[in-house]
Amino acid sequence: MLLPEGQYEAEAIDLTLGYTSTGKEQFVVTFKVLGPENRMLKTLSSYRVFEGNSPETTQKMRDMRMKELDTLKFDWTNLGLPSKPERVLITVEHEPDMKDPSVIRDRVQWINSTTRGAQQKKPMTEAERLAFAARMKVYANPSGGTPGDAKEPSVALATSEPEPWESDGAWEADQDASGTGATK
């Protein structure tokens, strides 16, 4: 059974360290994928390789895998998962099976914490935040002051259709006598 693509809460129930068929280090994590009322939908294993095809991608992949192990609360002393499974958010996508491309399978694309919330790739520094706020105040209130002081927008928004009061009279001609807008 394929899961619909999307995000799911899951618990990591098993994790093993090992090697790919080409000798690259990896870990395999098995998730209990949860649905409504914490009902188990299925188990899903994910193979997470630490090495890429170049030094740059290898470093990025290692960084990503280390974050994933941290999210799973990997125990570096016992080299395994904690006794109480950590609840995480996984993103499931579909892909062709490597052995038989005619078969589509679920793939865990991302492993994220359920408690962390949205994370910026590169948060602004304090100076950048202040400069951003100053620029945005101009858009919020072109006449100066704070955004709450703005009374009227200074620029009319373009619409796909003219408002009735801007028409050439055709709109009024289409109204019925009651003014409800029903056409004749």
Image: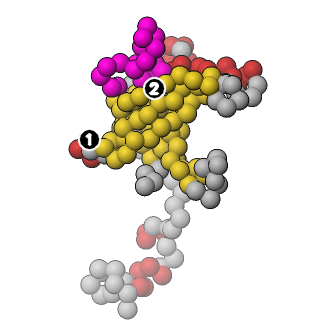
Which SS does the magenta portion mostly show? loop
Q: Position of residue 173 (x, y in %)?
A: 42, 85
Disc 1, SS: helix
Q: Position of residue 177 (x, y in %)?
A: 30, 87
Q: Residue at x 50, y 47 (%)?
A: 106
Q: Which residue is mark 1?
A: 38
Q: How many marks?
A: 2
Q: Quadrant of the C terminus?
A: bottom left
Which residue type carries mark 1? Asn
Q: Residue furthest bottom?
A: 184
- Viewer-proximal residue, 60 or 123? 60
Which picture quadrant has residue 102? Answer: bottom right
In magenta segment, residue 80: yes
Height in image: 157 above or below 162?
A: above
Q: For residue 66, say whether it is visible.
A: yes
- Nearer-N-terminus badge (1/2): 2
Height in image: 148 above or below 60?
A: below
On residue 97, the disc is: none
Disc 2, SS: strand
Q: Quadrant of the N terminus?
A: bottom left
Query: Tell me, what colour scheme is on the image?
Result: secondary structure
Q: Which residue is mark 2?
A: 15
Q: Is residue 172 left or right of residue 59?
A: left
The magenta region covers 69-86
Q: Residue at x 54, y 57 (%)?
A: 158
Q: Residue at x 40, y 20 (%)?
A: 81
Q: Position of residue 132 (x, y in %)?
A: 53, 24
